Amino acid sequence: MARTHTLGFPRIGAHRELKFAQEAFWRGETPEPALRETGAALRSRHWQLQVDAGLATVAAGDFAWYDQMLGLTALLGALPKRFGLDAASLTLAQYYELARGNAAQPAMEMTKWFDTNYHYIVPELDADSSFEGGPSWFFDEIDEALALGLPTRPVLIGPVTYLWLSKSHAPGFDHLSLLPKVVQAYRRILSQLQSRGIEWVQIDEPVLCLDIETNWLEAVDRAYAGLAESGLKLLLATYFDTAAPHAARIAALPVDGFHIDLVRAPQQLATWLQVLPADAVLSAGVIDGRNIWRSDLRAALATLKPLQAQLGDRLWIAPSCSLLHVPVSLDAEQRLDPELKSWLAFATEKLDELHTLATALNQGEAAVAAQLAASDAARESRRTSRRVVNQQVQKRLAAVTAEMANRASGFESRIEHQREALKLPALPTTTIGSFPQTTAIRQTRASYKRGEIGALEYLQRIRAEIELAVRKQEALGIDVLVHGEAERNDMVEYFGEQLCGYAFTANGWVQSYGSRCVKPPVIFGDVYRPEPMTVDTARYAQSLTNKPMKGMLTGPVTMLQWSFVRDDQPRATTARQLALAIRDEVCDLEAAGIRVIQIDEPALREGLPLRRDDWAAYLDWAVNAFRLSAAGVSDQTQIHTHMCYAEFNDILPAIAAMDADVITIETSRSAMELLEGFGDFDYPNEIGPGVYDIHSPRVPAVEAITRLLERACEVIPPERLWVNPDCGLKTRGWPETEAALANMVTAARQLRGKLASQAPVTWKRVARPAIADLATAHVHGAACDASCGGQPSA
Ligand code: GLN
Ligand code: ZN
């Protein structure tokens, strides 16, 4: 009998109950017991869904009050000492201080979980970190499931992944030196589970899908040797990519089963079948835990049938990874087009798919004829639907030439034309796009959406906001203006809503971090732009000023990265369709008299594959999509791009290959390291390193900005430098924004004066690297850093 299970389930609740309960608790409106009750109700509801879907075991311990890694840090008792908290008696309020900071201590760091948009709290460890155990919450949850009489399978993130993802403030600290202590702690946890009569425990080691070095692989051997003979059966789970390169080694570990991701990496199956021990369980992750499409059940059965013949009872069927990364249920999607809805499966529906697969294997396909027919129908209609396939788009895509991704001239010659056309001073000042999104602005958008105000009234109000932003920038003396993005709720949604091939769910929320949820749009069909999206707004904004007004667009890679994407064509193809749509907009902006156009790509770095071998191919198509979107304009038109909150130094050749005339880039996270990277690399085009952090209302002093700019001048030729904040200002208020920008302009002006009195320096220039050389980039860490993302609305 094939058995089914899931590696985890979304914890937020179908209606984001956990979010609202957490936030009420933080505001002091809900006492702790009420928050706990909400958590317990969600857990039991989610377990019931798993029981209803006939899963052989239910996942427990996958719940988290904020984040699963922070939960593990608490369970281990490995709290950073700087908080001065006692792990064993940790309260929920204190746990939230770790996640969110308190008056005395900044929050623990947060960063992206592998290549997902989920953010975890980074463990903060050092040589004398202790792992003596924390509060009993994890065990309480297991007891809760057991008390309900459920076939309970606890879920833990593994010791090696935990250490790999941790950070230390001590330079050069060897995290592996903590392994013996951590393994001891896991032994204690397992023995507590064993005493509860648990049979199987799932231990997640997604780091096994990364390029990890030999010393870490040896640590895996040591860790699991230390966990052997716990009296429990261990299911070692890998996901998000292939674990095949280490399969032989992993298969030799003293554990009882292995989960592999057969959606991201179906090709690893053959390797695993060769090395799988004769008595081990293989959990086949055949349902996509990262995307929202209904599965092709016939294809899954074609994979599973031979496995069942070979493995019998040792075959388990599962989603590829935890269902944490998809929304809870399709139930609330009443307004979604029925055909489109029939193509989708959220977490709850994915449990049903598991059930169908197991029934087909155990009782024969006739027992689930209707479900299989529905799956076939969905597949067939997606393949042929006019909603998906657009001949015009296909034709246009086929006609794209390599030249279309090249500007007419090289940067050296373009910049001369642009300088002549724009007549900007040295060290030109600008901002990244958004200005404070005041309550009034939000209300205007909301009332328009609800139909409370008409289109004319809406337009007038938005135009008033644009005018206000323009007047303020003129008064501040900024050189290249923006319109402020008052009409945009989210930088992807705003464009997605105007593009064909995009759909929006009513309730498709996914946890991003803590109580923050995002509702990624769905790209379901060929993407095209039926009509101009931003041209009227940009033209209006430009009409208010003689200074250049930047057109403001979201780039193709970011549009792709922050959406649920099609699984019926390569991501590269979807990116090219998006690129053509944005290219049309870029050209229309130029025709409307906009001379500077910014195409934001904050998500370029997060699309990087987990394995280095796959980087070059990704960067090749991603960079090409950006170039295709930008290259339709004449030399005089200046193309900007913007990036933030990621590690950039390891992809500098790719960033240079984007060939934007100007890049504005966030620097506060890495301070000068980033600038030095750009300097060492001899970044060939113009660059605006962010001169102040936009996350705090603190107004940066003129001197601080000047210091940063002077240092920037040492590594980047001053004639190629711009002056701007780190990122968009939508989360700030006007008073601090105006004060900060005033100081920024003052600093730029002072430095201009200084530079003018110095003899000009000549700077060596290097040839632009070929895109083919991009694979030589250097890996810094397991995951890129936490970001304000598109500062998504929640
Ligand atoms: N133009 C956008 C803004 O200013 C960029 C946001 C981002 O980088 N995430 O808000
Ligand atoms: Zn940004």
Image: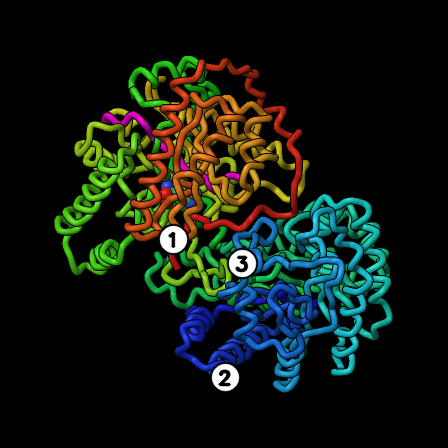
Mark 3 Cα within 10 Å, few/some/many (few <14, many 20+)? many
Mark drawn on residue 195: none
Q: Which residues are magenta?
A: 592-607
The residue under label 2 is which amino acid type?
Pro
- The residue wearing badge 1 is 697
The residue under label 1 is which amino acid type?
Pro
Residue at image x 86%, y 56%? Answer: 252
Residue 729 falls left or right of residue 94: left
The answer to whether residue 569 is above or below residue 429 is below
Residue at image x 55%, y 36%? Answer: 674
- The residue wearing badge 2 is 33
Provide residue 422's location: percent of width, then percent of height.
Answer: 29, 21
Earlier sequence position, callout 3 versus callout 2 = 2
Ligand 1 within 8 angstroms of badge 3 C-beta: no
**Ligand 1 quadrant assignment:** top left
Earlier sequence position, callout 3 versus callout 1 = 3
Residue 187 falls left or right of residue 137: right
Ligand 1 within 8 angstroms of badge 1 C-beta: no
